[in-house]
Image (cartoon, rainbow, N blue to C red):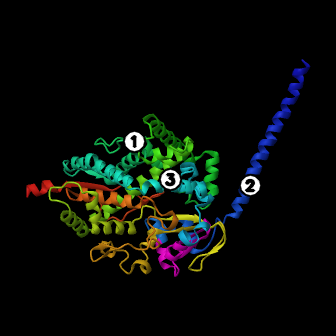
Amino acid sequence: MEYSENLSFLQPLQASFCFIFFFFTISFSIFSFSLLFMRQKVWCNCDICRGYLTSSWLMEFGNLCDWYTHLLQKSPTHTIHIHVLGNTITANPDNVEYMLKTRFDNYPKGKPFSTILGDLLGKGIFNVDGDLWVFQRKMASLELGSVSIRSFAFEVVMVEIKHRLLPLLSSYAEKDGSVLDLQDVFRRFTFDNICKFSFGLDPGCLELALPISQFAESFDLATKLSAERAMVASPLIWKIKRLLNLGSERRLKEAIKKVNVLAKEVIIQKRKLGFSTHQDLLSRFMACIKDDDYLTDIVISFILAGRDTMASALTTFFWLLATHPEVESKIRDEADRIMHPNQEFPSFEQIREMHYLHAAVHESLRLYPPVQFDSKFARQDDVLRDGTFVKKGTRVTYHPYAMGRIEAIWGPDCMEFKPQRWLNNGTFFPQSPFKYPVFQAGIRVCLGKEMAVVAMKSVAAAVLRPFDIHVVHANVAPRFDSGLTASLRGGLPVVVWDRRATKQHC
């Protein structure tokens, strides 16, 4: 009885203690957030910051990247600073070389960037610096640089073109006037390719029935919502939403959970099939990494690298061809000249001989890079080549999309789609990667660059000879969704016509 009375006496004290502890925790959290909030310059009355915060740029520009381009074009140094974001943005090739090569160590991805994408990419190669990055880079470099791997990649692409892409286009060509979303087709095409090449598994997303992929849908949502974190005026906004599991952060958490479950299933299936004798990239990593969480991060990074960027590049390339029939005609003429009359698919050697197509692909990427901008964070105070002071911790962004539209870099015709700017007496002539950082440049230059270009050329050569691709809204300027890569809002609706049937009818 006495014991019960003592317990009864303690209950109010316990309740009071819990209340005080809860109140102290909430108060301390609010105080901490307030300190961080005060350190952020969340309001600035300069024209650029006011335009960003009020979204007044929407009255004149359909895309944020076009507004940034406009500002960078007007700047004497082609560099601007958005105070409310703590972000210095540059389209100056000298600054790009300084960041990506000369002072590479002072411009890592940085903790702020890895925090934004950490929930999705974890310790994958695109979200780390230092030893983790060096290890993954070295492993991937050894594999992607080999002739056998490049030959394997070409074979994977050609099999997907022959057995899935062309049959799908043929089926729509037979349906007179039927509309097909070419962006969705290319996403499925590149997803199948990256899974077969990187993991040795075939998801079959480009089957004629166009099956729904839960992984692809969740991945799209996760990349979109992760990218939106970088757009808010203060990271406190999304961090508070994540803490309280609200709105977009709740949706992001659910999408990432699905992505991780399915990525881990890839690893489980690979172990069941065995990986010691396979030549795909995941098998090589699994031979020396036992941590499944780490492998999951690597799987997700592979998909981001090989699916979204390639799909984006192919989509805008075919949009440009639809609005420039003279370029499309020259690509066909070159393919007809190099390939045999009855040859359906080009060989690897023939693809390498197609210099005009090579130029057209690079020109398309100049105007519409899949990754429109890339950010680093200054480790120490610094001064860029154009004299811009960069304070320690500042986000420094180079902007390939804007760089392709700077007259000082590409001349007065910089806004025009002209593949010939890349040719010298009919032979492809490369430009400095620092004025054309579509594949990054310097130490972090994309290891899959050559394979990506070959894949794009293979698709173009195989598709353009038998088919005419008519874009439904060809005269409407591209509008982009927010995301880690440039995706066309609303997709790319097209109508497919079989050129062979047209010739027979004539």
Mark pair 1, 2: CA separation:
47 Å
Q: Identify the amino acid type marked 3.
A: Met
Q: Residue at x 60, y 77 (%)?
A: 388
Q: Which label was assigned to residue 32?
A: 2
> Is the residue 160 above or below the residue 309 in the image?
above
Nearer the observer: mark 1 or 3; the answer is: 3
Looking at marks 3 and 2 on the same chain, the residue that comes earlier in the sequence is marked by: 2
Mark pair 1, 3: CA separation:
20 Å
Q: Nearer the viewer, residue 371 or 44?
A: 371
Label 1 belongs to which residue?
201
Label 3 belongs to which residue?
139
In the image: residue 51, left or right of residue 353 = right
Q: Residue at x 32, y 45 (%)?
A: 206
Disc 1 to disc 2: CB gap under 8 Å = no
Mark pair 3, 2: CA separation:
41 Å
Whole-percent x, y for residue 247 in the image? 56, 47
Q: Identify the amino acid type marked 2.
A: Ser
Of helix, strand and loop, which one carries label 2?
Answer: helix
Q: Residues within 10 Å of mark 2 (few under 14, many from 20)?
A: few
Q: Residues within 10 Å of mark 1 (few under 14, many from 20)?
A: some
Is residue 79 found inside the magenta-colored segment of the image?
yes
